[in-house]
Image (tube, grey):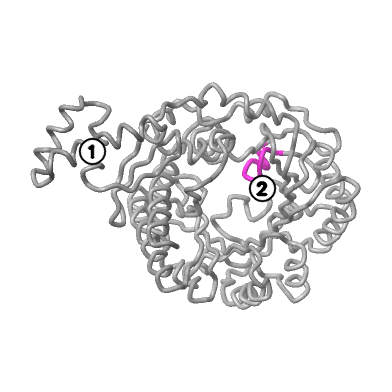
Amino acid sequence: MIHQYKLGGYNIVLDICSGAVHAVDELAYDSIALYESESREAVLSAMGEKYPELPAAEIESCYDQITALRDEGQLFTPDTFAPMAGRFKEKSAGVIKALCLHVAHTCNLNCSYCFASQGKYHGERAIMSFEVGKRALDFLIEHSGKRRNLEVDFFGGEPLMNFQVVKDLVAYARGREKEAGKNFRFTLTTNGMLIDDEVIDFCNREMSNVVLSLDGRKEVHDRFRVDYAGNGSWERIVPKFQKLVEARGGKNYYMRGTFTHANPDFVQDIRQMLELGFTELSMEPVVCAPDDPSALTPADIEIVKQQYEELAELMRQRDREGRPFTFYHYMIDLSGGPCIYKRISGCGSGTEYMAVTPWGDLYPCHQFVGEERFKLGDIWNGLNNPQVQGEFAACNVYAKPECADCWAKLYCSGGCAANAYHATGAITGVYEAGCELFRKRMECAIMLAVSRAAEGR
């Protein structure tokens, strides 16, 4: 399978199953489009008519180069991965590498678009005790097999509303690393309201990554991210974020924003973040019911697709000016990239990765918390819902018939199981609007990578 498109002044041809990316001239682009469906003679004839100024020998040479790429496994590579799809997760069955600890099912903001019901996850407000968190870390060590590197995300709600427990759990994990033969990497996601010097020092010492919630422009951010009195939070958090990022000294962080029906022109929010001095950025589509006022409309989707192109051009411009920045969804490595396991199987939710509630229940990921059908067990008694875990183990890109002919299937790995479930009622369903946006993002990301390679960046 191949995918061809033109963007940013490049003619790009993707060979889906090998992962090869080709930037070609017009003759090669048009010849490749006919190569599989037409004979050699028919292709040469068609190209001769379209490019009468080119010598016949050049057209023939182009065709032969395409054939050579095919023979080398860089064009028209057959899909041989389907038989492997079910086996990859079997090899790592029972091995957990990451937990999302919901240390606070409560929040000091009242964001209307919050998928977690302002941190309550459709239940009661609660915070995780040290004993529950300690048992969760022990559970992770016990079920991590031979894996050395373990990931723990402190999540909410707002995890800094339970900051002492976060500190105590990190100290406990550090105390167990050597004897357990493990290395913990921690991430904390925060809305910024409770950041102070102690939080900054702690995060910059212990957190491998910090995710900071900012929706960009003040008027956009303050429309949704308000406190319980209805007051916007932008002016209170931005100086704290700036101080934290400056103090991190180059360590990983992300400014993570959400775009909704109110701001499909999200590149303006990216520009605002850049003006504030932030360079590690992410803007995600809102996750909500289709009838929610925040939901993206079909017209919004078209705007967003154009915004992704504008964003890629902004990144190229800033590269040339020596002021590059990172956009999470445009991070792609053309020389390596994810292994075939990840390309087929996805994020590992429900198998390698799970979320832990304040009272120790286990769910496939943070977006399934509160959905009782998906409860996998708990950290005290282990996993006891083999049917649901089996569903997640069997969930891969080849389990979705709608993905069969999609050129992006080995880039998205079948997409987000939670988005599929909320859109279709099944984790093996397809969230069509999300697919449309993902394909556009990938086209832009690949074009940007091609441009950087061509310009030696």
Question: x%, y% of residue 15?
Answer: 39, 37
Q: Which segment did they paint magenta? A: 363-371
Q: Is residue 245 left or right of residue 181?
A: left
Question: x%, y% of residue 47?
Answer: 15, 38
x 36%, y 63%: residue: 313
**Residue denoted by label 1:** 61
Q: Earlier in the sequence, mark 2 or mark 1?
A: 1
For the N terminus, the quadrant is top left
Disc 2, SS: loop
x 52%, y 59%: residue: 282
Q: Amino acid at mark 1?
A: Ser
Q: Amino acid at mark 2?
A: Tyr
For the C terminus, the quadrant is bottom left
User: In this view of the protein, which residue sits in the foreground, 122 or 366?
Assistant: 366
Q: Is residue 204 left or right of residue 322?
A: right
Whether the magenta-drawn stretch holds residue 361 is answered as no
**Residue denoted by label 2:** 121
Which quarter of the picture shows residue 89? top right
In this view, 63 is above or below 84: below
x 78%, y 68%: residue: 202
